[in-house]
């Protein structure tokens, strides 16, 4: 049994419940967070939420060239990847607080 007997176990359970509530709140906040990825000097902008869903795509008409569709495709991919990396970094930063800096495979 833990030091402190039943009281120690109750305190430990309270701490675990509090940590779980904080973790759930952090997950909800992250899901609602919006980041932006850009490319082409801001000519392509993608906004993504914490659920990795694209919520906005803006393309400057100047970058639309029917003779060079490949460049536009590359700019969209670059903006998307930047936004996704920002969400990943934000998620890792947020949840490392709960893991005490430990990397827990499959958790984040």
Image: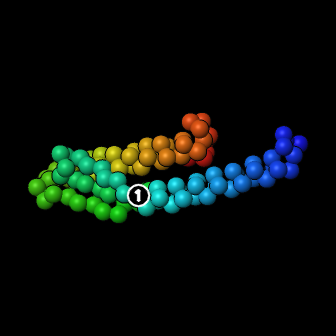
Q: Of helix, strand and loop, which one carries label 1?
A: loop
Residue visible at 22% across and 53% down in the picture: 44
- The answer to whether 39 appears left or right of 49 in the picture is left
Residue at the (26%, 49%) spot, across then down: 38
Q: Give the residue displayed 34% in from the left and 46% down from the top.
A: 82
The x, y position of residue 48, in whole percent, is: 37, 57
Image-quadrant location for residue 59: bottom left
Label 1: which residue? 33
Using the image as rendered, state which of residue 44 and residue 50 is in the foreground: 50
How far from the left and from the top, in percent, is residue 27? 53, 56
Number of labelled discs?
Answer: 1
Image location (x, y in percent) of residue 17: 68, 56
Residue at the image position 58 percent from the left and 58 percent from the top: 24
Q: Using the image, determine if residue 58 lies above or below residue 82.
A: below
Side of 82 relative to 97 (left or right) = left
Task: Between residue 62 and residue 14, name the one nearer to us.
Answer: 14
Is residue 37 visible in the rendered image? The answer is: yes
Front in this rendered view, residue 41 or 31 = 31
User: Residue furthest toward the top?
Assistant: 102
Tell me the crowding category of disc 1: few under 14, some 14 to 19, or many 20 or more residues within 10 angstroms, Cα based: some
Q: Which color scheme is applied?
A: rainbow
Going by the image, does 71 lie left or right of 18? left
């Amino acid at each position: 049994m833990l030091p402190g007997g039943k009281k120690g176990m109750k305190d430990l359970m309270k701490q675990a419940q509090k940590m779980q509530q904080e973790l759930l709140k952090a997950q909800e906040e992250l899901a609602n967070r919006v980041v932006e990825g850009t490319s082409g000097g801001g000519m392509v902008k993608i906004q993504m939420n914490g659920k990795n869903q694209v919520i906005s795509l803006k393309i400057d008409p100047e970058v639309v060239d029917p003779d060079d569709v490949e460049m536009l495709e590359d700019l969209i991919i670059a903006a998307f990847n930047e936004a996704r990396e920002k969400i990943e970094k934000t998620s890792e930063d947020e949840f490392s607080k709960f893991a005490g800096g430990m990397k827990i495979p499959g958790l984040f």
